[in-house]
Image (tube, rainbow, N blue to C red):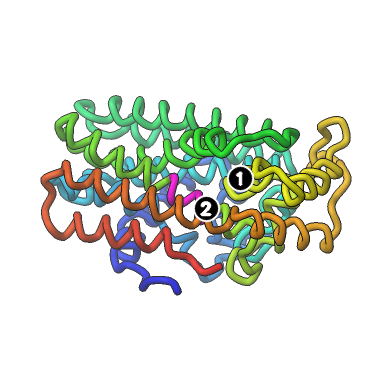
Amino acid sequence: MSVQTPEVLERVRELTVPAMRDAIARLEPSIARVAAYHLGWVDVSGAPVDGNGGKAIRPALAVLSAEAVGASPEVALPGAVAVELVHNFSLLHDDLMDGDEERRHRPTAWKVFGPAMAILAGDALLALAEDVLLEAPEETGPRAARHLTQATDRLITGQAEDLSFESRLDVSVEECLGMTGNKTGALLACASSIGAVLAGAPTAAVEALSGFGYHLGLAFQAVDDLLGIWGQPEITGKPSWSDLRQRKKSVPVAHALSSGGRIGERLAALLGSDLTGGVRVAEGGPRLSDEDLALAAKLVQEAGGRDLTMAEAQRQLELALERLDALEAPRRPRDELIDLARFVTTRDL
């Protein structure tokens, strides 16, 4: 069962969405249209639609990190916008690389506007994120920009690792967690501390908040790994067994493959049959049937992959909350960070 949506998300959307719209409006019009569609602000024709463009998890973490060190939410605004721009840069590129045709229950940007425009829009968002931060006060803006650049570098490294895992059947759980730490943990660590950086907070406070975000990222991704196999399409906005379709070596799959015995061998045979000289599904490789995918999901569960991943999500959440113990923060932002952490790690399958 999902926990109640934290009020901080709506509060942060009211602060950040106007700034996000102003930033997107600075882009070349054809690229801005792709970005606005991807963000859920317009339809294919460019007409405005109802919607808030996502939950604003990363902007909320950025704002709360500023408030946790005694600063106003406005101090965090450039960081909140920048991390959301980088997050969406990664989504635009990931959808294309993974061949995903749906996001949030409608066609992905590359399906609507073509791969070239989706790539350009992602590139533009990445450049725009750095511009937004460099326009912040000179005392902290450059430091925050470096903070984000380092996180982005790790995010890209993690995506490269994730892609390389697709053509392997010997990926370990430890490798998966390392990849997740780069691909998901690094940006959430940045989001959870960039407001504090912009506020000029002491290094110890920034590190505590960063550690909170890093472990929250690992917990968040563990839940995502579960949704990628057992999530309902009407909830996830993606097809059933979406990660298995892409042969992603997520934590539950890696655990099942390494379990050995009949289950591990049958799963390896299924996923291996979807490889042709390393050709990826998104590049025209053969696809597993729905019957094969259902069997693969069943094998992963029988091998204990689902239970192990649920336990890992809880373990990482507890580690994240422990990092807040090292932070002397006002009660409200601390409680809101805790509520937000529990919210993003309690999503319906």
Magenta: predominant secondary structure element? helix
Q: Is residue 223 magenta?
A: yes
Residue 240 visible: yes
Q: Where is residue 255 in the image (x, y as percent from the top left)?
A: 61, 45
Q: Residue at x 48, y 27 (%)?
A: 153
Q: From what the image shows, is residue 65 above or below residue 55? A: above
Q: Residue at x 65, y 37 (%)?
A: 119
Magenta stretch bounds: 218-224
- Residue ID for mark 1: 255
**Labels 2 and 1 touching (C-beta < 8 A):** yes
> What residue type is disc 1 on?
His
Most foreground residue, 243 or 55: 243
- The tag earlier along the polypeptide, 2 or 1, is 1
* Rendered image quadrant of residue 186: top left
Most foreground residue, 114 or 259: 259
Quadrant the C terminus occupies: bottom right
> What residue type is disc 2 on?
Leu
Q: Give the distance between the C-alpha atoms of the residues marked 2 and 1, in whole angstroms.
A: 8 Å
